[in-house]
């Protein structure tokens, strides 16, 4: 940076500057002196220094060449930052020198105290800032999240149910798809619509997710479809359960999933992974990040992967490729501009579901058979580009502008209909279908948040505005078939492809804009009041290109308020109550003209959140009741119209435990109870279950242990189970039931060298998911998940 010549300050000015410097140094010293829980395994010294800096909020500077090739011993216990640093440096030949402005400088222990030699490049390993980044923490417990608030808050400061799946948990449980990771969120159910999960829905608190977020910007559509991005591109997954109307506007009230991308890091780092698995699966990843210019003001990151996903089902193999790149530029010390893009494509096939006899009994089709044709395809592709400007204010506030465009395309072809299966296993295919969809989402969000002091307490204000548009073009063709096939001895290559004719050609454009604000006010040190609201304007326009018709409707100025109260009734526990709302437009018309009012989801939640074992373990528990009002029902006076009279209630209990139970023991555990019923509906619906595919009881448990014995040399062992109670699906008077089941998984990892780790994941042990028609003894495990194993070698440099 350029230097400016200034005149010497006067004596009083010097005195003031000296006093300020002393105060800053004293504050830094006091913050560093506070003991914290430390649990660092033996690892490269550079990694250990970064982990210690993050854990203690202490700045540690060093010449990168000094750290290269050095190892640090394991350090555990409740220690001050300086004591922990000295233990890490034991035997390294380095020493830590406390700096007047706070923090530490590392140098050779034999360096002369009076030396004036110029050091090489010095880099700050970490700073005491609120950052939700989980990469490099080696922990299941996140420090902060932003899914519910747009500001980085701890779990105890967030008056809603939020689960964060950290980068470490994604790696140790080998989650690469959103449908895999979502299953460990309390109460979330992934409803598979095909035998291999290529078409799925994510449900929470009784409702299917209708949108998701990328770095806090909402994207329309089912987040579990094949174009959902690979999780290797992301730092973490945040799941906000309940209505998210304050910052997202329209949507379903069940869950909002926020995928937070990996950021460019200030230090050069190269990661690579190669894995082979059962059923012919293989996967290769590469991830490089670091500074691209002097002083680290320009940083970059590039992630690329290729996966060949073999399948135990015939003709269901496929592949996936993805690339993510980003650049970050520090325009000033407080302002950063970042931009980047992600591209991903997949190639595979679709199967058509659950074959059954004419009386509704499920046919015993072999487990390795998928009802597909060799000419079928599933070919989604997506391109997402973004740009962000963020300014960190001296007051501790922030100004942020974010822009994102997501383009997706879907190219599918599959058998769409077949007759009931005969006793000999013969079924007759009647129809095939192609589906071509093109999506384009544009989103912009700008907000300003600032703290302020009053009455000896710190309060916070956030105000912002956003805009979102979603364009969809759907083209479908159908072909008539009359092909007999033996499903008990099925050959996908023996099915001829029919000729197709146009069936649908529709375009839809949806726009939403809104303004929002929220205040966090602390009248007392232990009490926080939160109040906020959003005003949304929503519209949609559709056109049927085959019929030449156009439709459209809008919602003008819909308000979604939010309110909460938090009480820190001890140093480690917080009690909270909150009420949140969301709306979902509906397409029906009411008698006398006019559009039916939107559905409104309102939720009341009461919970408690705690920080245990010196902050290493987070515990949450909450009860909720949600009502979904104004659901469209047929007008009894005129069936051509609807009335907003339907009403659904969803309620339940969720509990979660995440973090370190003890040194070297990490746990992620949750339990959820959920039920939903029609309070008012059709005569057949009223009083019945609303979401039959969601089990009442849902249990998740995953434990990882880092073995401390000298002979183990860094060995990690993990095990987990997911257990659910029974559930069912129905079509008319026919009901299919799946009994309760549990799925077990195992994990082991061993560091071959400090830079190389070999990991083994075995999933779906002892899994037998049986479906049966109610009242019959016949059943099928066609939807059962086959056992899978993956052996992965990971390298970090």
Image: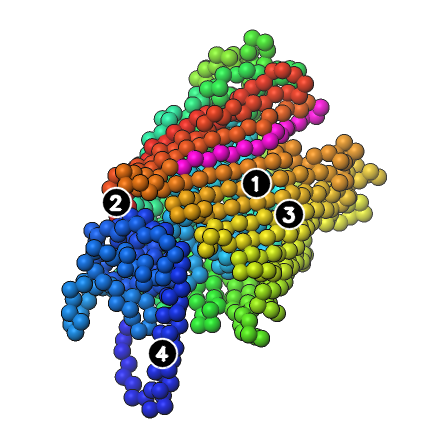
Q: Residue at left 39%, top 48%?
A: 663
Task: Specify the label residue 754 is tagged with.
Answer: 2
* Residue 215 rendering spot, x and y as whole percentages: 47, 53
Query: Quadrant where the N terminus lies?
Result: bottom left
**Mark 2 or 4, closer to the camera:** 4
Instruction: Judge whether 253 appears above or below 337 on screen.
Output: above
Asked whether, in this view, residue 164 is left or right of residue 327, the answer is right
Disc 3 is placed on an element classified as strand
Q: Residues within 10 Å of mark 3 (few under 14, many from 20)?
A: some
Disc 2 is placed on an element classified as loop
Q: Residues within 10 Å of mark 2 (few under 14, many from 20)?
A: some
Q: Which residue is mark 3?
A: 623
Q: Is residue 483 visible?
A: no
Q: Residue at left 63%, top 24%?
A: 736
* Residue 496 rendering spot, x and y as whole percentages: 48, 17
Task: Specify the label residue 671 is tagged with.
Answer: 1
Q: Earlier in the sequence, mark 4 or mark 3?
A: 4
Query: What range of the chain is rendered magenta?
Result: 718-733
Q: Residue at left 55%, top 30%?
A: 193
Q: Earlier in the sequence, mark 1 or mark 4?
A: 4
Q: Which residue is mark 4?
A: 22
C-alpha distance separating marks 1 and 4: 50 Å
Residue 163 counted in the magenta span: no
Asked whether 322 or 48 is in front, the reply is: 48
C-alpha distance separating marks 2 and 1: 37 Å
* Residue 154 rendering spot, x and y as whole percentages: 50, 57
Task: Specify the label residue 224 is tagged with.
Answer: none
Asked whether, in this view, residue 638 is left or right of residue 368, the answer is right
Q: Quadrant of residue 745?
A: top left
State if disc 3 and disc 4 touch (CB < 8 Å): no
Asked whether 268 or 163 is in front, the reply is: 163
Residue 732 counted in the magenta span: yes
């Amino acid at each position: 940076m350029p230097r400016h010549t200034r005149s010497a300050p006067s004596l009083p000015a010097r005195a003031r500057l000296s006093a300020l410097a002393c105060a800053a140094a004293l504050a830094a010293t006091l913050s560093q002196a506070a003991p914290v829980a430390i649990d660092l395994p033996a690892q490269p010294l550079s990694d250990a220094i970064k982990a210690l800096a993050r854990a203690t909020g202490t700045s540690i500077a060093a010449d990168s060449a000094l750290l290269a090739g050095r190892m640090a011993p394991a350090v555990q216990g409740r220690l001050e930052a300086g004591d922990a640093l000295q233990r890490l440096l034991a035997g390294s030949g380095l020493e830590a020198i406390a700096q007047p402005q706070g923090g530490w400088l590392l140098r050779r222990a034999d360096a002369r105290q009076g030396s004036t030699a110029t050091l090489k490049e010095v880099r700050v390993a970490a700073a005491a800032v609120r950052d939700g980044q989980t990469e490099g923490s080696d922990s299941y417990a996140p420090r902060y999240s932003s899914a519910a608030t747009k500001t980085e808050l701890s779990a105890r400061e967030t008056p809603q149910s939020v689960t964060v799946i950290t980068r470490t948990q994604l790696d140790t449980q080998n989650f690469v798809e959103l449908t895999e990771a979502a299953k460990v969120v309390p109460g979330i159910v992934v409803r598979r619509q095909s035998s291999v999960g290529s078409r799925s829905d994510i449900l929470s608190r009784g409702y299917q997710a209708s949108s998701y977020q990328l770095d806090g910007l909402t994207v329309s559509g089912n987040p579990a479809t094949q174009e959902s991005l690979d999780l290797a591109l992301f730092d973490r997954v945040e799941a906000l359960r309940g209505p998210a109307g304050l910052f997202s506007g329209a949507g379903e009230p069940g869950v909002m999933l926020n995928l937070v991308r990996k950021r460019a890091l200030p230090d050069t780092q190269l990661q690579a992974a190669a894995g082979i698995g059962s059923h012919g699966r293989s996967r290769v990843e590469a991830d490089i990040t670091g500074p691209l210019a002097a002083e680290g003001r320009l940083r970059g990151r590039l992630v690329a992967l290729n996966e060949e996903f073999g399948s135990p089902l015939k003709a269901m193999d496929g592949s996936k490729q993805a690339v993510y790149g980003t650049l970050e530029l520090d325009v000033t010390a407080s302002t950063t501009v970042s931009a980047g893009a992600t591209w991903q494509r997949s190639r595979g096939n679709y199967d058509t579901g659950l074959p059954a006899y004419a009386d509704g009994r499920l046919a015993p089709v072999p487990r390795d058979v998928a009802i597909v044709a060799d000419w079928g395809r599933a070919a989604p592709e997506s391109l997402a580009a973004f740009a962000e400007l963020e300014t960190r204010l001296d007051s501790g506030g922030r100004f942020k502008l974010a822009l994102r465009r997501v383009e997706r395309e879907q190219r599918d072809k599959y058998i769409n209909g077949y007759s009931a299966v005969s006793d000999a296993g013969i079924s007759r295919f009647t129809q095939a279908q192609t589906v071509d969809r093109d999506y384009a989402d544009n989103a912009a969000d700008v907000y300003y948040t600032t703290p302020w002091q009053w009455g000896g307490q710190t309060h916070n204000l956030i105000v912002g505005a956003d805009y979102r548009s979603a364009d969809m073009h759907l083209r479908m063709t159908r072909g008539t078939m009359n092909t007999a096939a033996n499903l008990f001895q099925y050959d996908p290559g023996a099915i001829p492809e029919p000729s197709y004719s146009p069936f649908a050609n529709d375009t839809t454009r949806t726009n939403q804009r809104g303004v929002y604000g929220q205040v966090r006010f602390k009248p007392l040190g232990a009490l926080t009041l939160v109040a906020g609201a959003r005003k949304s304007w929503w519209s949609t326009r559709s056109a049927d290109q085959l019929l030449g018709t156009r439709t459209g409707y809008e919602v003008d100025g819909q308000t979604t308020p939010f309110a909460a109260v938090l009480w820190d009734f001890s140093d480690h526990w917080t009690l909270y109550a909150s009420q949140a709302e969301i709306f979902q437009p509906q397409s029906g018309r009411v008698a006398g003209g006019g559009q039916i009012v939107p559905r409104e989801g309102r939720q009341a939640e009461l919970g408690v959140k705690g920080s245990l074992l010196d902050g290493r373990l987070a515990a949450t528990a909450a009860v909720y009741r949600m009502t979904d009002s104004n659901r469209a029902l047929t007008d009894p006076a005129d069936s051509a119209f609807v009335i907003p009279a339907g009403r659904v209630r969803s309620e339940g209990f969720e509990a979660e435990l995440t973090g370190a139970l003890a040194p070297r023991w990490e746990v992620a555990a949750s339990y959820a109870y959920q039920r939903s019923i029609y309070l008012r509906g059709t005569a057949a619906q009223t009083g019945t279950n609303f979401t039959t595919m969601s089990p009442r009881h849902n249990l998740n448990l995953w434990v990882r242990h880092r073995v401390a014995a000298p002979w183990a040399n860094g060995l990690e062992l993990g095990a987990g189970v997911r257990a659910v109670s029974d559930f069912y699906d129905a079509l008319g008077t026919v009901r299919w039931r799946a009994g309760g089941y549990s799925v077990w998984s195992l994990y082991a990892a061993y560091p071959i060298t400090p830079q190389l780790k070999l990991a083994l994941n075995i999933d779906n042990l002892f899994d037998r998911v049986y479906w049966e028609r109610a009242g019959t003894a016949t059943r099928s495990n066609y939807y059962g998940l086959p056992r899978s194993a993956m052996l992965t070698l990971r390298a970090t440099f």
